[in-house]
Amino acid sequence: MGYWWVNHKKTGKREVQGGFLWSPKRDRRGRPLRGYDNMELAQPGDVVFSMIGAQVGHIGIVQALAETATKPEEFGKAGDDWAREGWKLPVTFQPVPQSFRPKAQLARLKPHLPKAHSPINQDGGGSQNLYLAEISDDLGEVLLELVGLAGQVRPTSTPAVSSTEVLADIQQIESDQKLKPTTREQLVKARLGQGVFRNRVLKLHPVCKVTGMADPRLLRASHIKPWRECNNTERLDGANGIMLSPHIDALFDQGLISFENDGRMLVRPDLPAEVLNQWSIPASLTVSPFHASQWEYLAWHREQWASTQAAG
């Protein structure tokens, strides 16, 4: 879970009442803006602080990933100069117990404002060119206190990563200046098994494909075609993933099992039968069929599964 600050400007009341955020994908000159790119990064469960005019008066919870959508009809003539196509992010808003004006709380806010892409300027007014701003946990906690919700909303902490291989991948992503900052953030989160990739996989597989486990906290978003073999598009493609329980993920990741497109599980002969027996997994298991968008990735996995089997 993360924290965001939205400067609604002239469409604020319509967005709060409608339960969404909407932005163009580019500015009037066709250039990307950080405040618009951030729409793709917000995750279900994230907290959004809403500033309309000069007052923070609502708090929202992101309900789903942003999707491409035309400009809402309820905007009327507001935003006539915006492109018709943009991002729509579902957010459920509610009034806060106590609203506040950032200008009156600058002393509390300034120590926690980001050095770049701050949602407010030095005098407490909303940043003109920043629609949706990512803010730190520290600033989020201060805002929760100011609106009277201290201790009632807690972000989930990110587990520490110690794998040398994963850290090396992240360093490579961060140093690739050809990537947009937002793309780098998405790739890093995907490498950590979080963020956009995980949520895209959850849309296809809300439960473990094999066990039926439905608690997302106990599931892993497993790449079908491994990270090392993918281009950046494939690394973030939800079709290149399956939600699996940890022990099933271990079998799949090591190529000890694979799947046909129709859901039939393939078991490598060198996998001891007692492993499947102890985990109550039938060797002749057939799971629900896979989506057509996953067939190419599964073909890759089966090819590697077959080559490993032949080598063994």
Image (tube, rainbow, N blue to C red):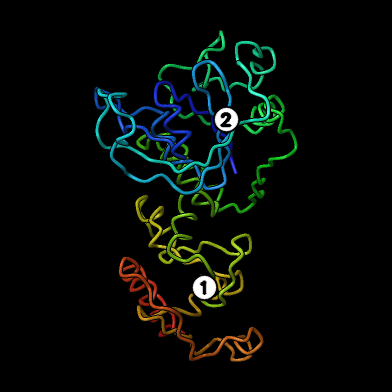
Confirm or deny contact between disc 2 and disc 1 (CB under 8 A): no
Give the secondary structure at mark 2.
strand
Query: Of discs 2 and 1, which sits in the foreground?
Result: 2
The residue shown at (33%, 30%) is: 75
Q: Quadrant of residue 152?
A: top right
Location of residue 41 in the rendering, given as x and y in whole percent from the top left corner: 46, 41
The residue shown at (36%, 32%) is: 23
Location of residue 93 in the rendering, given as x and y in whole percent from the top left corner: 54, 37
Q: Quadrant of the N terminus?
A: top right
The residue shown at (56%, 75%) is: 212
Q: Earlier in the sequence, mark 2 or mark 1?
A: 2
Could you say which is closer to the camera, residue 225 or residue 196? Answer: 196
> What's under tag 1, amino acid-wise?
Gln
Could you say which is closer to the camera, residue 67 or residue 192? Answer: 67
Location of residue 67 in the rendering, given as x and y in whole percent from the top left corner: 36, 46
Horizontal relation, residue 247 to residue 269: left or right? right
Q: Which residue is mark 1?
A: 254
Tally of numbered discs: 2
> What's under tag 2, amino acid-wise?
His
Task: Say if 189 sits above or below 244 in the image.
Answer: above
Q: Which residue is mark 2?
A: 58
The residue shown at (51%, 70%) is: 253
Q: Quadrant of residue 235?
A: bottom left
Horizontal relation, residue 86 to residue 35: left or right? left
Give the secondary structure at mark 1.
loop
